[in-house]
Each structure stands twice: as structure tokens, then as C-alpha cells.
Image (tube, helix red, strand yellow):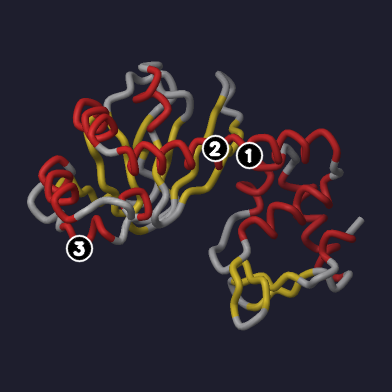
Amino acid sequence: MAHPANVSTTLLRNVPLFAGLGEDQLSVLARMIVRKSLGRNATIIRAGDPTDSLYIVINGRLKVLMSDEHGREVILAILGTGEFFGEMGLLDDSPRSASVVTLEPCELLTISKTDFKHSLAENSDLSLMVMRGLVKRLREADRKIGSLALMDVYGRVARLLLEMAEDVDGEKVVVKKVSKQDIAKMIGASREMVSRVMKDLQLGGYIEVRGRSIVLRDNILLAK
């Protein structure tokens, strides 16, 4: 469901992508941007589709994935509040390289390809933030490639948990629940292997499960 009239400059000011923009620039953007609310398991974009918009996450989480003709999936990333997606195809005019599906109810902002390109041409700060986002994705891809090539499944699970963890009262905690099936799709392993590794990590004292949260111990990268 789209709400073109309720995008305020106050909302945009709290979006990291627009952090460097002035009030006048935010006012122009507010007239271009549409707000959308989506439920769980909604497909936002599909791999191979024409690229027409940039999306910014206001609330909720989404997974970026690729799949083959047999339905097998690889999860490339999980996106959350403040992150954006869909910019690559807008810059090189290529079709969507991956699909994006909501993991929970989400609120998104969307801006059309034409308006986005115009905004980039007018705002060097916005262009810089987009470039930083692309560099971040490239570094994450490099880490993932290195992890797949050099780490065993224990190391891959440990590294992924550390990447997902937040600092809570001096502890590293995975607050947002991620299924073992999705973890398996993110690290290139089977669900059964991930279940075994998670159990071993818990028994070895490398992690502690507290309800829906996972607390990581300082020695987690030593897990074998």
C-alpha cells in the first residue's frame, strides 16, 4: 500500500542516505518519494526484472537472495532499518541482479529511477553516500568469498553471528531471530549442519541462547 502524501522532511532527515542534505534538498526529495507498507514474505523485486526504483528501509528486515531453476536459494544479505537497495541497476541500467523478500512486516521509501538519477546529479553528498554503500557491499562480498574459501562451517557460522550481533550492555547479542534454514543459505551449508554447529557452539560455551536472543562469548572465533 503506497502513501505518497505522508513523507516528511523529518522522516527523511533520519535516513542515513540523506544525512548530508539540507532542508531545501529534503523538501524536494519529499515530493518525489513514496512510502509503502508490506507484510511478511512479500517480494519487492525479482532477479531479472527491469530496474525502476530505489528502496530505503524504514522499518523491518528483508533478505536479498538468488535462486536457480530448482528452487535452491542463496541469501546474499539481510537488510534492516536505514539500509537501501536497488541502486546498482539504476546506475548501470541493468536488470535486477537479485530478488528481495520481506522477512517481517516492513515500511519502505521508494524513489523512481528518473528522480533518483536527477537527485544524484544535483547532490554530491547523496552521490558520496551511495558510493559508500556500494563499497560496503563490495567489502562484504569479499569477506563472504574469503569465508567460503578459507573457513570451515564452524568459522562461517561464528563470523555470521558476529556480523549480525549488536552491543547490548557490554555483550555481543544477536537480537533479531534468524532461522537455521536462512543461516544455511547465507553460508553455503545444509540446515542439518548448521543445527549441529549451533548445538556444539552452545555446549562448548561459545554462545548462550536466551529466549529469542543469542549471546556471543569472546572466544567464539576459536570454535572448531
Q: CA distance from mark 3 to mark 1?
A: 31 Å
Q: Are marks 1 and 2 in contact (CB under 8 Å)?
A: yes
Name of the residue lying farthest toward the left:
5
Rendered location of residue 80, percent (x, y): 45, 54
Q: Which mark is residue 139?
A: 1
Q: Quadrant of residue 205?
A: bottom right
The one of 23 and 80 positioned closer to us in this rendering: 23
Q: Amino acid at mark 3?
A: Thr
Q: Amino acid at mark 2?
A: Val
Seen in the picture, residue 146 relative to 9 is either above or below; the reply is above
Q: Is residue 80 left or right of residue 6?
A: right
Name of the residue lying farthest toward the right:
224
Image point (56%, 69%), residue name: 175
- Determine whether the residue tagged by mark 3 lies in a helix, strand or loop: helix
Name of the residue lying farthest toward the bottom:
169
Disc 3 residue crowd, few under 14, some 14–19, many 20+, Cα 10 Å:
few
Q: CA distance from mark 2 to mark 3?
A: 27 Å
Q: Is residue 148 left or right of residue 16?
A: right
Q: CA distance from mark 1 to mark 2?
A: 6 Å
Q: Is residue 142 left or right of residue 131?
A: right
Residue carrying label 3: 10
- Determine whether the residue tagged by mark 1 lies in a helix, strand or loop: helix
Seen in the picture, residue 175 relative to 186 is either above or below; the reply is below
